[in-house]
Image (spheres, rainbow, N blue to C red):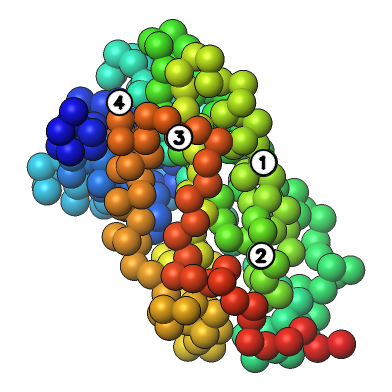
Amino acid sequence: MSLQEMFDVRGKSVIVTGAASGIGRAYAEVMSENDARVCLFDLDSKRLDKTVSEMKAAGGDAWGLTVDVTDRAAMSAAFAEVVRRHGRLDVVFANAGIDAGPGFLDPLGQRNDEGQIDNLDDHHWDKVIATNLTSVFNTIKLAAREMKLTGGGRIIATSSIAASYNEPIVGTPYMPAKAGVSHLVRQAAMELGRYNILVNAIAPGPFITNIADGRMANPEDRKAFTDWSVLGRVAETSEIKGVALLLASSASSYMTGSEIVIDGGVLLRPMKEAVPA
């Protein structure tokens, strides 16, 4: 098999959740740029329409569905529509997620009352877990049903280095949600391997996205994440495209239950700022 054949995703039927911007858009773009048929799911219909239009203008086979990933019935209907239109389902990126709000420290290392665990709003906790963990479970569930019918496929979930690296300036619900995603990926991979359904995760570190209203535009937030990276910078979303193509293609044919960290070396060293007593 040639290098081109290994990474060939031409004609593949692909779903990307949370695809209108950020990392999800990068996943959708790299699939479309390599001639896959891509359906973008997102709750933000205006941003979704703009993204789809731009991908089509670039020559991609892309279309979008406005869907809330926490709505099980809506997701089931959306998956059915993709299969009706494409005839099958080959690759799913379970990417949709939301910010968990401020952590118990601000970027300067000072205690933040809003982020203290005893002040966390129960509704906020439930919303983060529903969007960042439960929706991933449901996406994997729906993908597995379709992929079993056609002899296999690829499921790629977006986890985070927050699954194994606690961040005091990130809202507390984010860490257990992403840890759950990482463990769910391994569990699903163990179960679905016999059906040739490969389940893997990508664990990003600090990327420039629109999450948290684009908090990386805030100099203090950006400096905190930049300082933690051994490369001394945060990443552009385009830098995740190679990993996405690897996991969606035959180049990863013996990979399942894996998690690829792409974090600029954040996990290689502890945070510079100690947590105040």
Residue lying furthest top = 149
Residue lying furthest front = 1
> Which badge, 1 or 3, is on the more N-terminal residue?
1
Q: What residue type is labelled 4?
A: Ser
In the rendered image, which residue does mark 1 sit on? 183
Q: Percent x, y for residue 160?
A: 56, 56
Q: Residues within 10 Å of mark 2 (few under 14, many from 20)?
A: some
Q: What residue type is labelled 3?
A: Met
In the rendered image, which residue does mark 3 sit on? 255
In the rendered image, which residue does mark 4 sit on? 13
Do the residues bearing badges 3 and 2 touch, measured as CB atoms within 8 Å?
no
Residue at 70% in and 67% down = 166
Q: Is residue 49 visible?
A: no
The CA span between labels 3 and 4 is 20 Å
Q: Is residue 150 visible?
A: yes
> Which badge, 2 or 1, is on the more N-terminal residue?
2
> Which badge, 1 or 4, is on the more N-terminal residue?
4
Circle on res. 165: 2
- Please state the total of marks drawn on the protein image: 4
